[in-house]
Image: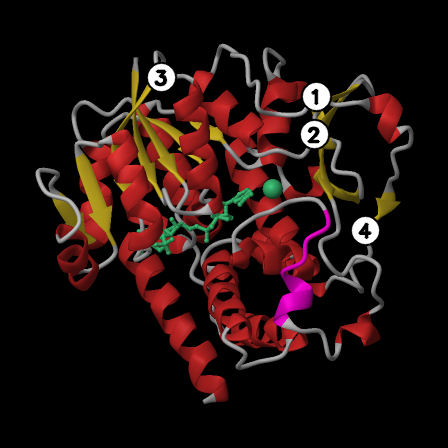
Amino acid sequence: MKKISLLGATGSIGIQTLDVIRAHPEEFELYAMAFGKNIDKAVPFIQEFKPELVVVQDENTKQKLSRHIDQIPILCGSGGLIEASVADPVDVVVNAVMGSIGLPATLKAIEARKVIAIANKETLVTAGHLVMEEARRHQVELLPVDSEHSAIYQSLNGEDKKDIHKLIITASGGSFRDKKREELEGVTVEDALNHPNWSMGAKITIDSASMMNKGLEVIEAHWLFNVPYDQIHVILHRESVIHSMVEYVDRSVLAQLGTPDMKVPIQYALTYPNRMELPMTKQLNLEEIATLHFEKMDMERFPCLRMAYEAGRQGGSMTTVLNAANEEAVQMFLEGKISFLEIEQLIENALEKHSRIHNPDLPAILSIDEETRKQVRFHLN
Ligand code: NDP
Ligand code: MG
């Protein structure tokens, strides 16, 4: 029986993780769950799974929640996320919160030598060097939940990493893949939230439309697999059937395929190194799909992807700025305060203004993150 601590339980990944736990009651038990403020969504899960510990974003939510549940301790804030990650009985921490808020909990979970299933890619973008250094020091492996990274992880299994020629990350293209740049002028939040292949949280759906999601994934892959940026390629593959690939020095290419369903990589991270049945996921029917398409990525069309490669190559604090500026700009777009194209402008400005720090420690990362967010907000207010 694996005891799981689930950070971000009310989100898109969180709810699908609960589906996987529910499907295998003799294998998994929910020990702790954390969410932000969404009490209405959380209460039925708390009643169903009866975790030993619940964590919420703030004191106010804690007060409100305590009217619905008794006998389960409720903690709040970043300290609460850390408690849920390091608690003794926990075997696996699934980090599925949205944003760099997940960083301190990831670091503490590594220190406590937990198995970490990581969906929270912002953790790796904002401070990949710190996370991977801690993971090496404590000999903890991070198991990717992001579908592309799970595909690469599976395609790397048992291979010698020195034989990797390149990683090939596939991109569905997001909601605006068939629009030209000039057609993006007046797009609405609703248009952007309408992803053709995947149903996900709001922030990552906007990131997919701007192609920043792929940029964040390139940086995530760089850190997870220790592969230089020149050896990480992105290719447009609109069917989302091949979730990513690894090309080896002998030109052999290994890939992982499947229907676009996050429960597959979530469950793989929970059962690794084993596999288990996943009855609620559709089988891949290649006869029905019949044709797969691939196109070269256009960096002019998708400047967010270009900026992510540039920030990644520059290294140091640049990716912290990239991530924080993006999180804040996307939030402002969702609030109706800026247009879609202003997202990339705000990120570009933030990157231009920043003086790079070579090897920022945790306090430096947290302060750059905060400063960047302020700057991005301030610029327009
Ligand atoms: P959602 O926005 O759907 O969910 C985010 C979760 O985090 C919610 O449970 C939310 O709680 C919680 N949360 C937010 N802020 C805090 C906080 N301060 N303290 C505690 N909990 C908090 O996001 P997704 O599930 O889409 O994405 C989660 C992560 O997984 C992201 O990093 C994303 O990039 C990554 N990912 C997602 C994929 C997907 O298919 N959705 C695919 C691959 C990666 P509340 O509901 O109360 O706000
Ligand atoms: Mg992905």
Residue position marked by numbered label 2 in the rendering: 259
Residue position marked by numbered label 3 in the rendering: 25
Contact, mark 2 vs mark 1 (Cβ under 8 Å): yes
Q: CA distance from mark 1 to mark 4?
A: 29 Å
Single out the mark in the foreground, 2 or 4: 2
Q: Quadrant of residue 324?
A: bottom left
Task: From the viewer's side, name the closer residue of 182 and 72.
Answer: 72
Q: Quadrant of residue 133?
A: top left
The stretch in magenta equals: 189-196
Which mark, residue 113? none
Task: Say if 331 sits above or below 46 in the image.
Answer: below
Q: CA distance from mark 3 to mark 2?
A: 24 Å
Q: CA distance from mark 2 to mark 1?
A: 7 Å
The amino acid on which the numbered mark 4 sits, given as a three-letter code, is: Met
Residue position marked by numbered label 1 in the rendering: 283
Marked residue nearer the N-terminal end (3 or 2): 3
Marked residue nearer the N-terminal end (4 or 3): 3
Q: Residue furthest left?
A: 71
Q: Residue furthest bottom?
A: 381
Task: From the viewer's side, name the closer residue of 190 and 364.
Answer: 190
Please name the residue shown 63% across and 27% down the image.
151
Marked residue nearer the N-terminal end (2 or 1): 2
The amino acid on which the numbered mark 1 sits, given as a three-letter code, is: Gln
Quadrant of the frame with the N terminus: top left
Q: Callout 2: 10 Å neighbours few (<14), some, many (20+)?
A: some
- Image coordinates of residue 286 in percent, x first then y, are 83, 23
Single out the mark in the foreground, 4 or 3: 3
Q: Callout 3: 10 Å neighbours few (<14), some, many (20+)?
A: few
Please name the residue shown 57% across and 70% down the image.
347
Residue position marked by numbered label 4 in the rendering: 297
